[in-house]
Amino acid sequence: MEVIEAYPSEKDYYTAGVLEYNFFTSNKSFRESVELNLNEYVRFIKLAKSKDVEILVFPEATLNLYFVDVREQISEYAVVIPDPKLEIAPCEYEEDYSFILVELSKAARDNQIYVLVNVVEKDFCTWGSDACKPPYNVQNDGYSLYNTNIVFDRKGRIISRYRKVNLFIEPSTNDPLDQPLPIFETDFGVKFGHFICYDILFKYPARTLVQQENITNILYPTFWFEGLSYFIAETIHQGWAYSNNVNFLVSGANVLRMGTTGAGIYFGRKRIQVIETKSDPIRKLYTAKVPKNVRADFKFEEPQIWEESSAADLLKVRVKENWISDYPVFFPIEEPQKTICVNDEKICCTVEVKRRNLKVPDGAVSYKYALSVNYTTKLYIERRNLGEITCAIVACTGDTMDTCGRRFHTKNVAPGTEFEHIKITARIRSEQFEDVMIQPNTASTGLLPFDVWRYTLTETDVYSDLSYTYKNFTIESTTAVSDFLVYGLFGRDFTMDYDKMEDVARFYEKSHHKIHLV
């Protein structure tokens, strides 16, 4: 682990806190589950204050949602949220607001700290209004439920709200209407943006915050589900922070039996400041001094927090394998290089490697490796077809391509190949690169990305013609690499996405039945 010491002036950084949080559930009642977690939230706010944290982020769906899956039960403790423009502190109007908002508002005020909390929001609507009819609401019960971020300031006032746009297996939750970009300013001179979990794969609001508003400090609550090859939580989070070159403050729910984990603090292309794989359930606060301007030259005051569990211990963590299942054919890796073009040469993926075989102890198994190249529309969860781009080396548990995108379920695994050097270049053709996102995607067998000093990522213009622009995206190793699950580039082409909302509306009109989004 590299430790860099420096002493920035106080005006150059702020102190942030994120959580890895295994939520409480009660066998008695939903109400008791909510109260148990609310009390724990307040405890963590006090703990954060004792560590001089100025802004604290809680995970997605760990307060008043994931203990039941029935809409009517969820709505009982969903909260009505005042318009952030009014800057109301619920603790000053206890009779008007849910005890959840009141207690959180008190804790933020009493501890003089900014707090982002993810809640289920209840918003009443009248039949005939856009919010109460398809495609936004198909339940016809007079209210909408939203997966919502709210931000409290130091006075306990609600100053920002964001309703999740890109839902992921949330049948009781509604799609929101248009809303402002989720941005707020603090008294320590930093402007923040925020979004939720699955939003990270989409242009709005995630990329829009960076590209359109130049926001470089992002708060991100998540309830992520681990998936191979490209959807390991920390891999996606670090890759997004690196690609967009932003401070990324991630709070993750912790439910290992569901494959849910992922807290971390990322300093853009400079450093992974806080990261840890968890082989046992935990509730833990991580803090860091965060540079206000991650794109400027700066040094670090604190040592890096990097804790990686063994691959054997991490077998306790459920990881969905070969997800999504409709990957194209994998290709063998050839030395010194191999180029594969797909989708009418919309992408050409060139892999240059230098590798050597390692001796595998008797009785042990080792990963083989193949090349995955893809530029197509894929069916994701919730009937969403998304434009996906891959150009990467992936691990396989055998000699056939159907074993790729999987991991061994045994403790006796040893490295069989060392890549002394890897260089992967994706030449991409596009009409509008502002709608193309490419990010590094690396994961060790310990389910963590490689640190930023272990590779470089470059983007170069190749040429343009009357219709298209061609660019090269290159990831190149700076150290030897062995025993990994994926190493390369992952991306999205937002122009290829199919609008789920239109699909739901058409389905509703055709069936004339009340439906749930599944």
Image (tube, rainbow, N blue to C red):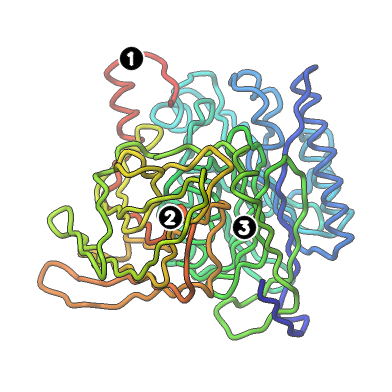
- Residue at the spot 59% in from the left edge and 39% down from the top edge: 315
Q: Which residue is mark 3?
A: 219
- The residue lying furthest to the front in this view is 362
Q: Which residue is mark 2?
A: 486
N-term-proximal mark, 1 vs 2: 2
Q: Is residue 80 above or below residue 399?
A: above
Instruction: Report, in whole angstroms, how far the alpha carbon at label 1 lies from the one at label 3.
Output: 40 Å
Left or right of 490 on screen, residue 480: right
Q: Which residue type carries mark 2?
A: Val
Can you say which quadrant of the picture contains the N terminus?
Answer: bottom right
> Measured from the top left, where is residue 456 in percent x and y?
44, 75
Residue 138, quarter of the rendered image: top left
Instruction: Report, in whole angstroms, how far the alpha carbon at label 1 lies from the one at label 2.
Output: 45 Å
- Residue at the spot 57% in from the left edge and 30% down from the top edge: 145
- Residue at the spot 45% in from the left edge and 46% down from the top edge: 178
Q: Which residue type carries mark 3?
A: Leu
Instruction: Report, in whole angstroms, how far the alpha carbon at label 2 lies from the one at label 3.
Output: 26 Å
Helix, strand or loop at disc 2?
strand
